[in-house]
Amino acid sequence: MESGSIAEELGIEPGDFLVAVNGQAVEDILDYMEWMSNDEVSVTIEKVDGQIWELDIEKDPDEDIGLTFEQPIMDRQRACCNRCIFCFIDQLPKGMRPTLYYKDDDWRLSFLMGNYITLTNLTQHDIKRIISKRISPLYISVHTTNPQLRRRMMGNQRAGDVLDILKEFEKARISVHCQIVLCRNWNDGAELERTLSDLWSLRSIVNSVAVVPVGLTKHRQGLESIVPFDAESAAKVLEQVERWQKMCRRESGTAFVFAADEFYILAGKGFPSYQEYEDFPQIENGVGLIARLVHEFDEAISNYRGRNLSIKEFSVATGLSAYPTIRAMMDRLQREMGLKVHVYPIVNRFFGESVTVAGLITGGDMIAQLKGKDLGKALLIPCTMLRRGEDVFLDDITLEGLSLALGVPVVPVPVDGNELLKTIADLDRILKDRRE
């Protein structure tokens, strides 16, 4: 219950149960959000002692009455029912915290949080609700539109229905963003061509498509054999994607399909310009992340030149993929602002050396590789290394635990060029606030 809210003023208390809104049972948070958007609502509450309260409320249409729920979506979260050959969770080592092994595939979280879903656990009731409520956009893991191949790759007979469901969405104008997790010798080459062609035919609702290389850890015992992408195969993917981009831009003015940054790194090829990523529709998929980071850094650095910073020596830890970019940015800071910056690429021993993104680096790997190194007054890390909303790494080492092990404060920084510079400029104040 939010303090000072309408709900608190009405006497609603923790433990009370929301029975209905406007006389209708609430199925989940989407019903609640829709029905509470009116200026007059009737709320039925069952009190802890069993009393039933009928409350008529007048409010502004966009005003929240301040209820919070034990389950954020007000319903059981939908789990994934697939057995994908590339599932990252199946490649986790044993002994990690239980929540890391949970596979969600909930269309409501796709709408609310941008989570990618496979559509394999949708019921006709779900589809009707999506259409009737105009739930849009959704984020869809397509991978392939070949029904037989999709069933095989995802270990689910319902996986072959993806195009049929997308065509239902097309009739209802439900917009989507799509991703293709590309597995070498599985859904690349001619299969990728087929998938892009099918999605392009649905371009009235498909806003963007991300092509992302499969993530392979060293913990794949007993799983399907997948060959990792190398420089040559990554270059072929980029050639195919760029050919599609040229055609799509010519016909519609948008690139439509975007390759993940990792493909450019694997191929040893320069990234597209900042403008070529348009409005960065697939940034959460690692598409254009580096181009945007560099652009933000370049735009902001002039605001910090000439400042006399109290802390002139610090360090930065990142993954192997981002290391060349971060190294170049920090070299520029050293030249233009007289700072001394140590940049350390962390090799992923926990998941395997083929995993090179910063977001999958563990606290244990940083301790092993940074202990005894020159770290300056503080160590900066991308906040993507930490579990969302928490100061905990994937291996359960805390931010405080890492700081104690390394003997310096560890400061998480958003993956944003301007925020990076702002953190560096404010580092002395940030550390003082922590001490107090």
Image (cartoon, grey):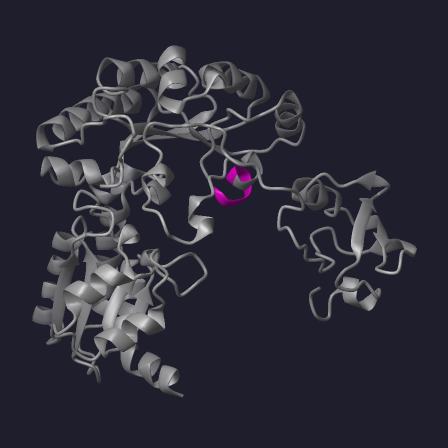
The location of residue 312, given as percent across then percent down, is: 16, 80
Q: Main secondary structure of the magenta part?
A: helix
Dividing the picture into quadrants, the one containing residue 256 is top left
Up-down relation of residue 97 to residue 336 (above or below): above
Quarter of the image with the N terminus in it: bottom right
Residue in view at x 36 percent, y 34 percent: 87
Dividing the picture into quadrants, the one containing residue 70 is bottom right
Up-down relation of residue 195 to residue 47 (above or below): above
The location of residue 326, given as percent across then percent down, is: 17, 58
Quarter of the image with the C terminus in it: bottom left
Q: Is residue 361 visible?
A: yes
The location of residue 18, given as percent across then percent down, is: 79, 50
Residue in view at x 28 percent, y 47 percent: 289
Task: Based on the picture, tell me whether residue 113 belongs to the magenta stretch.
Answer: yes
Up-down relation of residue 7 to residue 189 (above or below): below
Task: Based on the picture, tell me whether residue 368 belongs to the magenta stretch.
Answer: no
Tally of numbered tags: 0
The answer to whether residue 238 is left or right of residue 427 is left
Question: Nearest the camera: 348 or 113?
Answer: 348
Residue in view at x 84 percent, y 60 percent: 48
The location of residue 236, given as percent across then percent down, is: 14, 24
Question: Nearest the camera: 168 or 219?
Answer: 219
Residue in view at x 88 percent, y 60 percent: 49
Q: Is residue 255 visible?
A: no
The answer to whether residue 242 is left or right of residue 31 is left
Magenta-colored span: 110-114
Q: Residue furthest bottom?
A: 436
The answer to whether residue 233 is left or right of residue 285 is left
Question: Nearest the camera: 371 or 245?
Answer: 371
